[in-house]
Amino acid sequence: MKVFVLNSGSSSIKFQIIETNTQKTLMKGLCERIGHENSIYTVTNVEKDLKDKNVPVYFHDHEEAIKKVLSLITDERIGVLKDYSEIDAIGHRVVHGGEYFKDSAVITDEVLKDIESVSHLAPLHNPANIKGINVCKRLMPDKANVAVFDTSFHQTLEEEKYIYALKYEDYEKYQIRKYGFHGTSVRYIVKKLDKIDSSLKNIIVCHLGNGASITAVKDGKSFDTTMGFTPLAGLPMGTRSGDIDPSILEYLSNVKEFNEKEMLNYLNKECGMKGLCGSSDNRDILSLIDKGNKNAKLALNVFCNKIASYIGSYYVELGGLDAIIFTGGIGENSPETREYVCDRLKAIGVKLDKGHNFMRTNDDVLLTDRDSKVKVYRIRTNEELMIALDVERLVL
Ligand code: ADP
């Protein structure tokens, strides 16, 4: 089955064409700065290894960008399909499914209404996701559309894990609770790990990218996770603060004279690794550390310390631990970060094999010594493939 996977953001869209039989990406691309004068696109035909990078084209809106994508998919030189009727179905990344969606869903009018009704929980994301869905429905009315939610995997959390100790009525009235994100990635990892070793029942998935979260998984189900009501909670990230004392907000608004919007912008875009050392990029941080930069070292220590402390806490919650998985841009590609974290996990019996940890390979690898009490793996995630496989499961 050929699936068009679409991730429609507020000013950008990412897409892939995936053949589910081979699980291969045929084509992928990105339109950026939609609605701005300097909008551009990048597109790659994976099989032919052909790439058009940062091509300037003015995209007035999402519809124009998606029309361009469809013409690129069928382009004689760089395209992969003769006609877009060859697309079998469409998979949409949707950030928030609230408490409605415990699984991905074929998009009907009712499903779309439910997605709209939880948009207030992700006002920066869901409206943009809905735009993508509506444009696809208009341009390709005969295709099935499937919504795949970042939150749905975490709907198995028990109440004691997702409830905040606020007034209970505020959960009931306003749905204030932990939702968790990165669920599509974690689900993919759980599926892949099960194929590697199906005896691993208590696992912790560290999805470490610009956005970073940790999820405890028991018997294949999400058991606890670090992101919360929004993706701002939990670990410090590239530019997000992660958990802080909530009273800091009032203090900050006084000393910096922030309004609500400025406060959220500060916490989401100016803090985390960038706030501590000036760069949000793990590669820059590592090279700054090499040059003796103390703040870069502090930033990485803060990041790794928090990761290790959540792992310790989830070890207790799960009642034991079989495996830890590193994934995401940093988790997959930064052996230094993995080592910093694992050095802090000796108390729970983690023994890293440093040779394996630094091995350059695209394969999924076991990183621990034979006598390590907890196994540690590096596994590459693929959220787009997970979306395509959900489409296949729900549409075929
Ligand atoms: P996003 O949350 O935006 O999807 P990614 O999963 O792409 O983020 O991860 C981005 C992070 O991965 C950046 O901090 C980047 O520095 C890091 N990263 C990517 N490649 C490497 C590498 N080879 N070594 C160290 N860090 C890397």
Image (spheres, grey):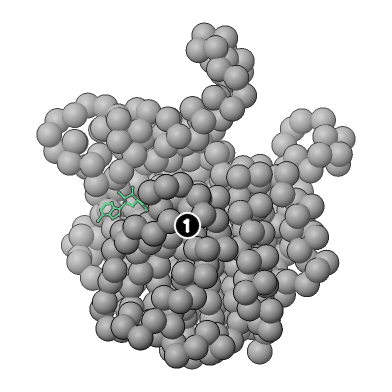
Outermost residue to the top: 255
Nearest the viewer among 317 and 341 is 341
Q: Is residue 301 visible?
A: no
State the image coordinates of residue 70 (x, y, percent, origin top left): 49, 75
Q: Residue at x 61, y 15 (%)?
A: 250
Say whether residue 40 is left or right of residue 65. left
Confirm if mark 1 falls within 8 A of ligand 1.
no
Q: State whether residue 33 appears in this view.
A: yes
Q: Using residue 191 as the reference point, say whether residue 304 is left or right of it.
A: left
Q: Secondary structure at mark 1?
A: loop
Residue 293: image quadrant is top left
Between 20 and 347, the one nearer to me in the picture? 20
> Type of residue at label 1?
Phe
Q: Quadrant of the N terminus?
A: bottom right
Image point 41% across, 62% down: which residue?
A: 30
> Could you tell me residue 259's position as x and y percent?
60, 19
Q: Please name the residue that numbered disc 1 is placed on.
A: 59
State the image coordinates of residue 390 (x, y, percent, origin top left). Answer: 61, 77
Mark 1 residue crowding within 10 angstroms, few (<14) / some (14–19) / many (20+): many
Q: Is residue 238 above or below residue 93?
A: above
Residue depicted at 63% across the width and 66% down the height: 135
Please provide percent x and percent y for residue 275: 37, 28
